[in-house]
Image (spheres, rainbow, N blue to C red):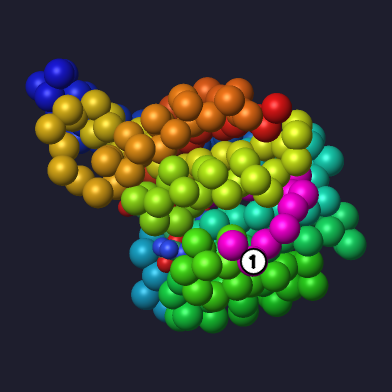
Amino acid sequence: MGVAWRRQTGGVNQSLWSAVDDYWIAKLHEPDSALDAATADSAAGGLPPIAVTAPMGKFLHLLARAAGARRILEIGTLGGYSTIWLARALPSDGELVTCEIDPHHAEVAAANFTRAGVDKVIDLRVGPACDTLATLEGPFDLAFVDADKTSGAEYLRECVRLVRPGGVIVVDNVVREGAILDPVSTDGAVMGTWRLADAIAAEPRVDATVMQTVGGKKHDGFVMAVVR
Ligand code: SAH
Ligand code: DHB
Ligand code: MG
């Protein structure tokens, strides 16, 4: 098992995956100065380059629109790249609560929200997400879980409490280049993903599947769940 997953890692097709993303972005995405500036200022601020890709951001945006979302929860803001995509799916009286533990990340994100013109619908909460989540009440129409990978099981439990029946929960980074298949992994993120997987499997209130992703950001994937 360990050998099988290692053989497939290493990002050997990374340049191909990125080029395919670029092809589709050129076909389907409008030029977007606010998102470009959010990415540039996140890099200039020293934030790690771990935001969702443009196709993933637009996927989240379209999912929120398809769900008719009026209230969105995000766990893990970083510089607000995914937040901006999601916020743009909301009506003008909608709301997006986004949780970020790092005050510097939050400061960069807040400036990005203002420039993108979405600050009015965003409620940015600085602090450990578990503390913020305990203060929230539903219903939310969609939740995007993308913070520390050790607490996924706890975040899932809170999202099941907060998201309405028929609402959507998306959890990022559940594949990790296949590292989740390493049976002797001691990596905290991998072990957190196993706990998350067990929690979803044991959660009768959601129907869920996985979607693996490649593209500008290597081989990873997300869980998508709908609340019963
Ligand atoms: N969703 C963003 C990327 C988030 S990266 C995007 O795609 O654009 C993960 C973020 O989660 C980081 O900014 C990190 O500081 C934050 N984070 C880590 N642990 C956290 C916690 N316990 N509570 C809230 N945020 C946390
Ligand atoms: C990484 C990627 C992510 O999407 C994330 O949320 C956190 C970390 C990474 O590649 O390290
Ligand atoms: Mg992520």
Q: Position of residue 140 (x, y in %)?
A: 74, 49
Query: Magenta stretch containing residue 159, yes or no?
Result: no
Residue at x 80%, y 45% (from the top left corner)? 69
**Quarter of the image where the N terminus is located:** top left
User: Front-most of 139 and 30?
Assistant: 139
Q: Amino acid at mark 1?
A: Thr
Q: What is the x, y in percent for residue 224?
A: 57, 32
Q: Is residue 11 above or below residue 140?
A: above
Q: Residue at x 54, y 75 (%)?
A: 126
**In this view, 17 is above or below 148:** above
- Given residues 99 and 110, the one toward you in this image is 99
Which stretch did the figure color magenta? 134-145
- x%, y% of residue 154? 46, 49
Is 203 on the left or on the right of 120, as rendered?
left
Q: Residue at x 89, y 62 (%)?
A: 93
Residue position marked by numbered label 1 in the rendering: 135
**Left or right relative to 27: residue 222:** left
Residue 146 at what x, y percent from top left?
A: 48, 51
